[in-house]
Image (cartoon, grey):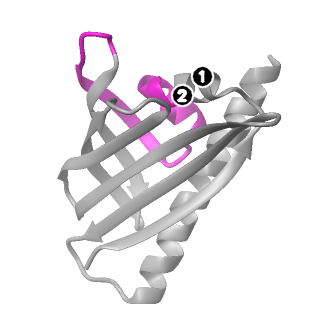
Amino acid sequence: MTDRATESTTIAASPDAVLAILLDFPRYPEWAKDLKSVEVLGADDQGRATEVRFRAAGFGRSTSYTLTYDHSEADVLAWVLSEGDIMRKLDGRYTLTAVDGGTQVDYELEVELLIPLPGFIKNRSQGKIMHTALGELKSFAERSATS
């Protein structure tokens, strides 16, 4: 069963600055603390990553997955899971919207695990993943904007 969640935050940085951070995959472990390694496997003719392999801490163990990125919409970074060891689906998107004083970031995520977990554990884990990801992105982007 696929679970879907959304969360939003406002970051005191321009959409271009936030997008630049999101597109700089090799630097993700600097701000996304659960990520242990990131490897860009493919890029488009503009140099933007189209396929990225991640190794992350998850559910008390290390997990690996590969995401395929879609850059077809302006101010949107979308992805789908192409390979994963504990999930069947890990599809999502960041949508960036300019607002007074910065950028509203809407984060959508759809997850389907290979191993069924009780609902309360999935909901708690998914909420933590989204909240942490947005919080770490916000902190890093705002620190970078003032440096």
Which image quadrant: the N terminus? bottom left
Q: Position of residue 25 (x, y in %)?
A: 43, 27
Is residue 28 on the magenta stretch? yes
Label ID, residue 133? none
Residue drawn at point x = 77 percent, y = 28 percent? 143
Label ID, residue 16? 1
Q: Position of residue 78 (x, y in %)?
A: 36, 42
Q: Name the quadrant containing residue 46.
A: top left
Dot 2 and dot 1 residues touching (CB under 8 Å): yes
Q: Position of residue 19 (x, y in %)?
A: 54, 28
Residue drawn at point x = 54 percent, y = 59 percent? 130
Q: Amino acid at mark 2?
A: Leu
Disc 2 on helix, strand or loop? helix
Q: Report how far apart the C-alphas of labels 2 and 1 lie in the structure.
A: 5 Å
**Circle 2 sits on which residue?**
19
Other-residue count near label 2 (Cα within 10 Å), few / some / many at <14 / 14–19 / ≥20 = some
The correct choice, above or below, for 9 with respect to 18 in the image is: below
Is residue 41 on the magenta stretch? yes
Q: For this view, does 1 lie left or right of residue 125?
A: left
Q: For this view, does 126 lie left or right of residue 33?
A: left
Q: Which residues are magenta?
A: 22-47
The correct choice, above or below, for 1 with respect to 66 in the image is: below
Q: Position of residue 139 (x, y in %)?
A: 73, 39
The correct choice, above or below, for 62 with respect to 20 in the image is: below
Q: Amino acid at mark 1?
A: Asp
